[in-house]
Amino acid sequence: MDLQRLLSYTRRAVDDYEMIEEGDKIAIGISGGKDSLTLLYALKNLQRFYPKHFDLIAITVDLGYEGFDLTPIEALCKELEVEYHIVHTEIGNIVINERKEASPCSLCAKMRKGALNQAIIELGCNKVAYAHHMDDMVETLMLSLIFEGRFYSFSPRTYLDKTNLTVIRPMMYVPEADVKGFTNKYQLPVVKNPCPVDGITKREYAKNLVRQINLEHPGAKKRLFTAIIEGNISGWPKKQPSFRETKR
């Protein structure tokens, strides 16, 4: 996937669900992985021509694991002229060593999100962009169906009244395969996740399940995504009609 295609996906999502307004100050949570770095590229380049002016700040929550070198991310943000902040924490040590959680992902995510939101608020941002792509949304649907018994997936835009922040997901239309292609094509400086339980979570189970279903029934993943978009999920914002739809 090239930059033009990435911007096409991103612009469509932003317009369909009114994710960006004039004067927004948007934080991007940078984990160091391919998804968040692709989102950084997408929003920075969208910023150059989007009719509504908005500012960007990149933020990484450092969980305190050894070997988590963010130097390449700092260099990329400098190249893109995006303000970058690192929030240093001991979350990894607390969850893995002190609490010795058998299933640490939930607590880790909660603490990481808390640290990120605090930094976002302190930096004066009113929105935070998450790098969830199409596959993430389908996998979330599968997790919800299997483990919660409900039809649910991430909302494109969510207002958090406790923090007065709005979460947006501009990469919701981007397939993960295209994210991988973009990462390789533009040689993004991906930083390996040092988490000791990375790759053995329920989400990884859902990813493998969706992959198998799509192998056995080609196109099933896109149909599942269409079901999400058209499923009238509670709390989802109304999709805005595209220019083409208004001309019909």
Image: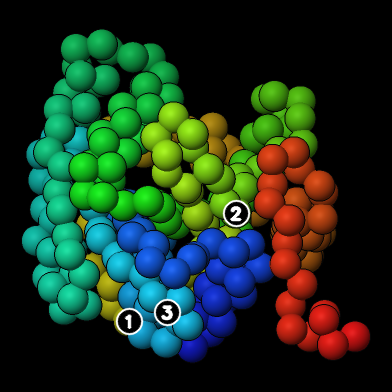
| Residue 186: mark | 1
Of the pair 12 and 88, the residue shown nearer to us? 12
Q: Is residue 208 visible?
A: no
Please tell me whether residue 218 is drawn above or below residue 208 in the rendered image. Answer: below
Please tell me whether residue 246 is drawn above or below residue 103 in the rendered image. Answer: below
Q: Quadrant of residue 76?
A: bottom left
Q: Quadrant of the C terminus?
A: bottom right
Residue at 40 percent of width and 52 percent of height:
127
Residue at 17 percent of width and 60 percent of height:
84
Of the pair 69 and 20, the residue shown nearer to us? 20
Tell me if label 3 and label 2 are in contact, CB under 8 Å.
no
Q: CA distance from mark 3 to mark 1?
A: 17 Å
Residue at 81 percent of width and 47 percent of height:
232
First in sequence: mark 1 vs mark 2: 2
Q: CA distance from mark 3 to mark 2?
A: 17 Å
The residue carrying mark 3 is 46
First in sequence: mark 3 vs mark 2: 3
Q: Where residue 177 sits: x, y (%)?
A: 54, 68
| Residue 156: mark | 2
Please tell me whether residue 236 is drawn above or below residue 184 in the rendered image. Answer: above
First in sequence: mark 3 vs mark 1: 3
Q: Is residue 76 left or right of residue 183?
A: left
Tell me if label 3 and label 1 are in contact, CB under 8 Å.
no
| Residue 106: mark | none
Q: Residues within 10 Å of mark 1 (few under 14, many from 20)?
A: few
Mark 1 secondary-structure assignment: loop
